[in-house]
Amino acid sequence: NAGVTQTPKFQVLKTGQSMTLQCAQDMNHEYMSWYRQDPGMGLRLIHYSVGAGITDQGEVPNGYNVSRSTTEDFPLRLLSAAPSQTSVYFCASSYSKGTAKNIQYFGAGTRLSVL
Amino acid sequence: RKEVEQDPGPFNVPEGATVAFNCTYSNSASQSFFWYRQDCRKEPKLLMSVYSSGNEDGRFTAQLNRASQYISLLIRDSKLSDSATYLCVVIQNTGGFKTIFGAGTRLFVKA
């Protein structure tokens, strides 16, 4: 029962490098989201998607791109990494309707350091 | 002002104690409310949903006060395993999907 799978678990980048954080879910959830978590700040929404082919910006979208070509996958791309993007990144998914609506299931997270 | 505010703690309590956390939210359009639990270096996991009528799950009781715009979580008979960070989550249905997390309240339960 995989749920939400994120890769990699850890990553170190140099300033200016690009990379993609992978996220996949096998629960057929319509909604998927990317958050970053920094000390004392709580989780902040980066980008989200309400279904395949549809994405939108969250609270802190600058420096990140997303796409949703399938229901299962929602990769997050860092275009040119900056030290301010050092954080823990969580992917989450949820149903859009029904009794389980809006209950989010999280991946295990990716710890990213940008030097 | 943050949209969702929590006392960061930490709350240090002995085993068996009763502890209560509060969370306030600023947008009256908020429609769904949850408490999540996050263990150190782990992902958040749903603890319980919060309803206006209040709801209980074993030692945990959640309450919502829409008039005052706050939600609460009460933990009775605290266990060592309750040590974690508790996140207040508010969903705003403002024509889109907006989930707002509080920064969390840290709880340490000691023997």
Image (tube, coloured by chain):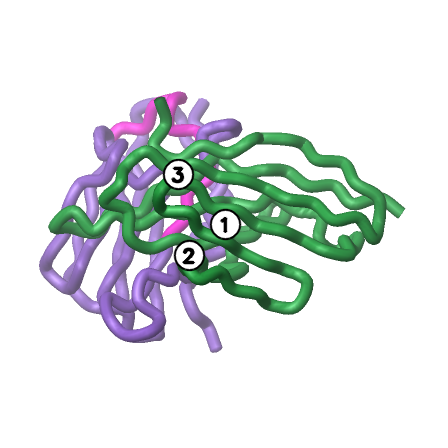
Magenta-drawn segment:
A79-91
Q: Categorize mark 1 by other alpha carbons within 10 Å: few (<14), some (14-19), many (20+).
A: some
Indicate the amino acid at tag 3.
Answer: Ser
Position of the N terminus of chain B, as image quadrant, is top left
From the viewer's perspective, is residue B95 above or below residue A16?
below
Find residue A43 and report its image quarter.
top left
Residue shown at 32% from the left, 28% from the top? A81
Q: Residue at x 25, y 61 (%)?
A: A31
Marks 2 and 1 in Cβ contact (< 8 Å): yes
Q: Which residue is mark 3?
A: B68
Q: Which chain is purple?
A: A
User: Is the C-beta separation of discs 3 and 2 under 8 Å?
Assistant: no
Hey, which residue is sitting farthest right in the picture? B111
Q: Chain of mark 1?
A: A
Q: Is residue A76 left or right of residue A91?
A: left
Cα gap from disc 3 to disc 1, whole angstroms: 41 Å
The percent position of residue A15, horizontal first and vertical second, equals 36, 23
Q: Which residue is label 2 attached to?
A: A6
At label 3, counting other C-alpha atoms closer than 10 Å, the crowd grade (few under 14, some 14-19, many 20 or more) is: few
Q: Residue at x 53, y 38 (%)?
A: B104
Q: Nearer the viewer, mark 3 or mark 1?
A: 3
Amino acid bearing label 2 = Gln
Q: Position of residue B75 (x, y in %)?
A: 67, 53
Residue at numbered disc 1: A9
Which SS class for mark 2?
strand
Q: Chain of mark 2?
A: A
Q: Colour of chain B?
A: green
